[in-house]
Amino acid sequence: MSYYRILGFQKEPFSTSPDPEFFYLSREHEIALTNILIELRLKRGLSVILGDIGTGKTSLSRRLIQELKEREDFIFHMILEPSFENEDVFLRYLLGNFDVPIIDSQTDILNLRSELEKFLFQKGVIENKTVCLIIDEAQKMSEMTLEVLRILLNYETNEYKLLQLVLLGQLELYTKIMDMRNFFDRISFKYILNPLNFNETKELIEFRIRQAGYKANMHLFLDEAVREIYRYSRGYPRQITMLCYRALKSLVMRKKVVVDAELIEKIIHDEVKIGWQRNDLLLQRENY
């Protein structure tokens, strides 16, 4: 039997997979999501969400996808790994994923752009649809890819952009696009996600265990434990999730009924110890 069923859960409460059903919508995530949806509805063009590793950008993108699936007038595609060899490969990728047929494999870049523009015009103007491209890990994009996106953002009517673009990336993305003024100037909405505060950390933990089917009236994580989790994780959702996962497994193994500060401190101590051991091993290999 899975450890979480022993504790009365129906699902794994602290999986690191970006399941929209387990996405805790903090104040900042809600601000970001609401504004993105407004930008998409108004067809303003380019939205950029920035955040450090583990602040919930990928989970936010999955929640956005969930929202768009409920809207029949949206056509969207998501890119998870935006590393492309050249413009030809990138354009063919986009056309393929938007189901635009390319009859001639020798079609040059200008014609590929033209095909994409015709597709955007057909969907956006003739059929009154909103075409949206969402790119996660956007900091990995090359200058070439950004330049192609800039060109695509030029496709517009007198009232709106034909392609809606949402970029989610680490903070280094900001530096990269700042160096491209003609791209940076096209940003309609920009937002930086920060770590959670203590109360949000507590709410996230409670939200996820309830979403997983926990019905008991007692709090599974004592406040003292949540404070230790917050202190160690600094409010980063990914770190909170991983620490809570280890806490619940340890709870079962130790046959305890609640997660207290002592249990969290033991897990943190073990993690730090393992981290030092790994560093020592790497140093030994380098010296060898």
Image: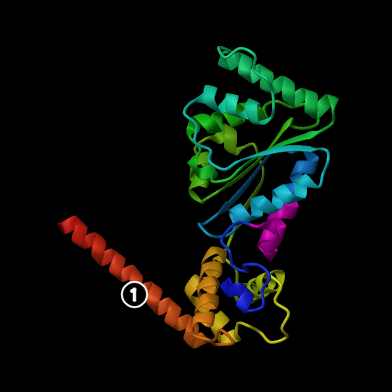
Most foreground residue, 81 or 248: 248
Q: Amino acid at mark 1?
A: Lys
Q: Quadrant of residue 15?
A: bottom right
Magenta region, main secondary structure = helix
**Residue 33 left/right relative to 171:** right
Residue 155 vs 37, above or below: the answer is above
Residue 21 vs 94, above or below: the answer is below
Residue 181 vs 284, above or below: the answer is above
Percent position of residue 34, x then y: 75, 54
- Magenta stretch, residue numbers: 19-35
Question: Is residue 235 among what the camera can see?
Answer: no
Percent position of residue 231, x then y: 50, 77
Q: Which residue is pictured at 63% across the width and 83% down the height?
A: 220
Task: Check residue 55 for magenta coloring.
Answer: no
Q: Quadrant of residue 51?
A: bottom right
Question: Is residue 224 among what the camera can see?
Answer: yes
Percent position of residue 282, x then y: 25, 60
Task: Check residue 21 for magenta coloring.
Answer: yes
Residue at the left extreme, as displayed:
288
Q: Could you tell me which secondary element the residue under label 1 belongs to?
A: helix
Residue at the front extreme, as displayed:
1
Quadrant (top left, top right, bottom left, bottom right) of the C terminus? bottom left
Q: Which residue is pictured at 55% across the width and 33% down the height?
A: 146
**Residue placed under numbered mark 1 in the picture:** 273
Quadrant (top left, top right, bottom left, bottom right) of the N terminus? bottom right
Q: Which residue is pictured at 47% across the width and 74% down the height?
A: 232
Percent position of residue 247, x then y: 52, 77
**Residue 15 left/right relative to 179:** right
What colouring method underlies this structural image?
A: rainbow
